[in-house]
Image (cartoon, rainbow, N blue to C red):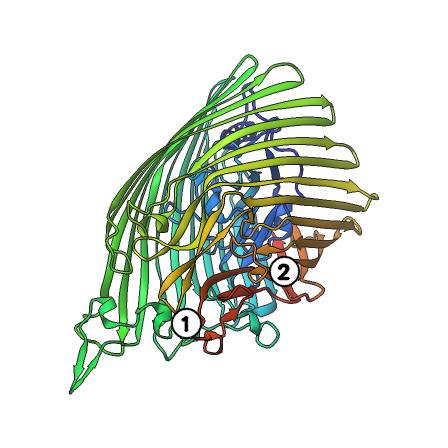
Amino acid sequence: MAALLALPFIGFAQQPSDTISIQKVLNEVNVNALRAGEKTPVALTNLSKAEIEKGNLGQDLPYIISLTPSVVTTSDAGAGVGYTSFRIRGSDPTRINVTVNGIPLNDSESQGVWWVNMPDFTSSVENIQIQRGVGTSTNGGSAFGASVNLKTDGLNKNAYLLTNNTMGSFSTLKNNVEFGTGLINNKFTFDGRVSKISSDGYIDRATSNLESLYLQGTYFGDNSVLKGIVFSGKERTYQAWYGTPLNYMDSNRTYNPYDYDNEVDNYGQTHYQLHYSQQLSDVTNFNVAGHYTHGEGYYEQYIGTEHNSVLYNGDYVFGQNALSFYGLDDVIIGEDTITTSNFVRRKWLNNDFGGFTYSLNHTMGDIDFIFGGASSRYSGQHYGNVIWSQYASNASFNHQYYWNKAEKFDNNFYAKANYKYTDATQLYIDLQRRRIDYIFEGLDAEGNSAEQEVNLEFFNPKFGLHHTLNESQVLYASFGVANKEPNRSDYTESTPDSRPTHETLYDTEIGYKQVGDKMTFGANLYFMNYENQLVMTGKLNDVGERTHVNVAESFRKGIEIEGTYKLTNKLTWAANMTLSENKIITPFVEHVDNWDTWGTDEVTHENTDIAFSPNIIWTSQLNYQLDKNTSVDFISKYVGEQFIDNTSSEDRMLNDYLVNHLRVSYEWESKIFKTAKVSLQVNNLLNNEYLNNAWVYRFISDDWDPSGDDHYVNSDSERGYNMAGYYPQATRNYLLGLSLGF
């Protein structure tokens, strides 16, 4: 379990005199510009390098942080490799701000983070800070549920060569090589990593082939550090995103409807960062960073009846097998007119993201100041090509049937101050101004105009108090405001008459921490009150697309408890629990498609649970240190019931689940290896069958029962049907790792 305390909020009392101390000081300064410190009044968890390495056997980052409070992980392939994600306090990835060394990682348009594009990145991460709630000002999208800050590896004084290798269930393989020169002439270091991960996945054909690269070079001046970083990921993943029918869970649990050989996602992304830190004086430090990211790739689909027929049967794709949908002429053969065809298409994304960040840290008496901000520009091209058609019609090779482009400019400035009011009490203020300019042009995938322009400006203030009761106990309280813009689809699938407005969050946090020799304990009360939160209601906008709808008032409130207790010299227990209530207060109208009338029926709901927000989550980790070389961990994770839409209907609900894992590691030294470690992780030790994610489309039909024709359709208790896909997670499976250091 992570430690309860973070890095200190830095004030400078002396001038560093060597490379090691300048690296340490400037590293901490850079981190604290966007991170919370020991006396910052926010709910947080820090994960150290050692804690990260414990579980770093090839699974994606969401599984590395899965034991921290209020976190729920998901995996399309069911085994933690490929398309994975996480929620914090019920908030989805589009509401969680993620940065790497202070550089925004969230996609500017979808606002999520695709960890499949960053395989094995955690092998190059020194530590992770997870702030729950609004947290401190950061760069990129606002934190509506949490923020996650990743700091990459720092100074390695000595040369090293390390290889990490994993094999496991579902043909899972991970191989990497990490290397570094150590400190050269007390001025330079160079570090790198190459990785390859592959897995067949638990779900049928849910294969992943992932490659990544990390390179870092650092120059140490007398009072400065210059660091260049390049990291790149390439993924080819067979799609499992449609899920499995509910009624297959007993007979064909690993079912995947896709059987076209090349139903794949194929994407590559490369990040460039250049960081400069300068200690201007004993009390003043300056940091600036430039960054650029290029991504390009596609996902390929078969549209027709030969493959994936359960998905692409007539109206289920709303005419996407029609020649006219692709701007193609009907085909006339004799007296017959052919209007539909089978197709293979690729939907492309070609995007660029660049900008700079900066911060100035200054101490003046009892006040620590941080001034900073960021400016970035995103440019993304979206387009689709038909690469094969059963009937060629008038198509040329690689026929392009839509193209659109978006540009997004994101600028923010923040000012923070930590004031030592007394020896025991510190006051905190954090003010951020953020402006977004978002421009679209071209046609979307449905052939509708995407042209529009959006301009938004937000003010996000935060205030807090930290009070030390004694040397082992502290209290803190904070209040913060965050504003968040709608994502790309909310804009492109609407017009000015139906466009949703931005969301606002008012977050109150009250916490207590205690640190002792044998025990640590922390409790955090939170109340997150939302104004105009965007939720799915089934409503169609004025261009016929399902979109998010603003609900006037909703909230999340709860308590997070975490602690560690040293039961014996060898046995330590770490645990955390979240108890919460997550509600939409304002009555809202659910719009349910009526397949008999080709219209929609309206159902009014009030005081319902927010989707994917379990009321209880707890984690337990027992660590037994058998001897200095051998460690055993028994891990348990419980997630309560959660609804998959916002109606609180038990017809659309995921059952609670408890999953247990066993981890054993043995580490030794020899004349050949500086370090050697063998790790065995048995996931889902008790072989439970459980689901952690789903999607649903609800409709009404009195004249026709479609459940016999489509396995994804089930009737519900409310005069309707649910078309839904569920994501089964792997039963008992293992990962066996070997790390060798030279």
Element marked by disc 1: loop
Taking the image as drawn, is residue 714 in sight? yes
Q: On the image, which quarter does residue 155 sit in? A: top right
Q: Position of residue 178 (x, y in %)?
A: 53, 51
As shown in the figure, which amino acid type bears the numbered disc 2?
Answer: Asn
Above or below residue 405? Residue 355 is above
Element marked by disc 2: loop
Mark 1 nearby-residue class (10 Å; few <14, some 14–19, many ≥20): some
Q: Which mark is residue 311?
A: 1
Q: On the image, which quarter does residue 484 sit in? A: top left
Left or right: where 473 falls relative to 527: right
Q: Which mark is residue 655?
A: 2
Q: Nearer the viewer, residue 647 or 85?
A: 647
Is the Cβ of the residue at disc 2 closer than 8 Å to that at disc 1? no
Above or below residue 36? Residue 496 is below
Q: Which mark is residue 396?
A: none
Q: Please tell me which residue is depicted at 59% across the width and 64% down the height of the picture.
A: 729
As shown in the figure, which amino acid type bears the numbered disc 1?
Answer: Leu
Above or below residue 480? Residue 259 is below
> Mark 2 or mark 1, which has the lower sequence index?
1
Above or below residue 79? Residue 616 is above
Q: Nearer the viewer, residue 493 or 512?
A: 493
Q: Please tell me which residue is depicted at 65% across the width and 31% down the height of the picture.
A: 511
Q: Position of residue 267 (x, y in %)?
A: 38, 58
Residue occupying the far right of the picture: 568
Mark 2 to mark 1 CA distance (whole Å): 26 Å
Q: Please tell me which residue is depicted at 24% across the width and 72% down the height of the picture.
A: 323
Q: In the rendered image, which quarter contains the N terminus?
A: top right
Q: Position of residue 390 (x, y in %)?
A: 27, 79
Q: Please tell me which residue is depicted at 67% across the width and 18% down the height of the picture.
A: 424
